[in-house]
Image (cartoon, rainbow, N blue to C red):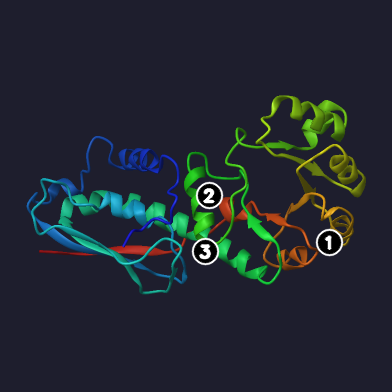
Amino acid sequence: MLPWLHPEPHDWWSVVELALAEDIGSGDLSSASLPAELLADWYIEVQADGILAGLGIAAHLMQPEDDDPPSCDLEVLAQDGDVVRRGDVVIRGRLPASAVLSAERTALNFMMQLSGVATLTRKFVDSVAGTSARVVDTRKTVPGLRALQKYAVRCGGGFNHRMGLYDGVMLKDNHIAAHGSVAKAITAARRVASHLIRIEVECENAAQVEEAVAAGADVVMLDNMDPFMMREVVKQFGDRVLLEASGGINLDTVRGVAQTGVHLISVGAITHSAPALSMHLELKSR
């Protein structure tokens, strides 16, 4: 079974190798006491219900090397995006005990963090079920982990917003203030953006939305608008431009926001505040 939900996040292996090097440093002093020939059967078990993400990282870290004994192996028992329950074993294998223990924490750190993002995302997605709204992420990610966290959002059933400042234009309040108006900001952005790039504008009231739509915005973010104002904006402009709700939306409020008819709901919490999904690795030496 392939652990990744394709497409895989960009350049994930370099992030993982950096994390492993951060932990091992000049050498694993604890595992150095173990005989090199000592083999261990190991498995990773989920300790809470949730959505799985990051299993491919564990498979990468626990893959037998060419010079390991022939009896070493790896068995992947699940796939990213799967619903998992407490007690589920998602991956197992046999390796030199020192190799397992050196990679254990790095594998669990990634799996627990990413599965936490996927799990919280799924809660938001489930909360808007039956509406036309999509739950999307933001750039409020852990530095260095953006591609992986945004991958985990997809594992949870959410959708990705722009990956960074390079693949989409978003004109926020400070951009508008610098340009002098919504229309001037959009016109200036059109001059420098590729024809394939969408332009999104952050608006705080209906007047700004009207100005943004008239100036040719592709997406309008309704920033911290109350549901009543959102509903009116949707009635007036919902068939002319994509409307994205944003700002302080949580699990208690997200369904009400979705019911206004907005097309997108961006939630920073699914990446910056997701609690880890508990897991552990167990082994038995042979």
Up the image or down, 65 lies above or below 125; here it is above
Neighbor class of circle 1 (other Cα within 10 Å; few <14, some 14-19, many 20+) is some
Type of amino acid under label 2: Lys
Q: Earlier in the sequence, mark 2 or mark 1?
A: 2
Q: Position of residue 103 (x, y in %)?
A: 27, 50
> Which callout, 2 or 3, points at the residue further toward the start of the chain?
3
Distance CA(mark 2)–CA(mark 1): 27 Å
Task: Identify the mark at residue 49; answer none if there is no mark.
Answer: none
Question: In what quadrant of the picture does the N terminus appear?
Answer: bottom left
Q: Quadrant of residue 13?
A: top left
The residue at 58%/58% (across/down) is: 158
Q: Position of residue 106 (x, y in %)?
A: 34, 49
Which residue is tagged 2?
A: 150
Q: Nearer the viewer, residue 85 or 199?
A: 199
| Mark-to-mark CA distance, 3 and 1 | 26 Å
Which quadrant of the figure contains the C terminus? bottom left
Which numbered disc, 2 or 3, marks the residue closer to the eye? 2
| Most distant residue in the right direction | 207
Which mark, by number, is residue 227? 1
Helix, strand or loop under label 1: helix
Q: Nearer the viewer, residue 249 or 126?
A: 126
Under mark 3, the amino acid is Thr
Q: In the figure, residue 55 lies in which quadrant?
A: bottom left
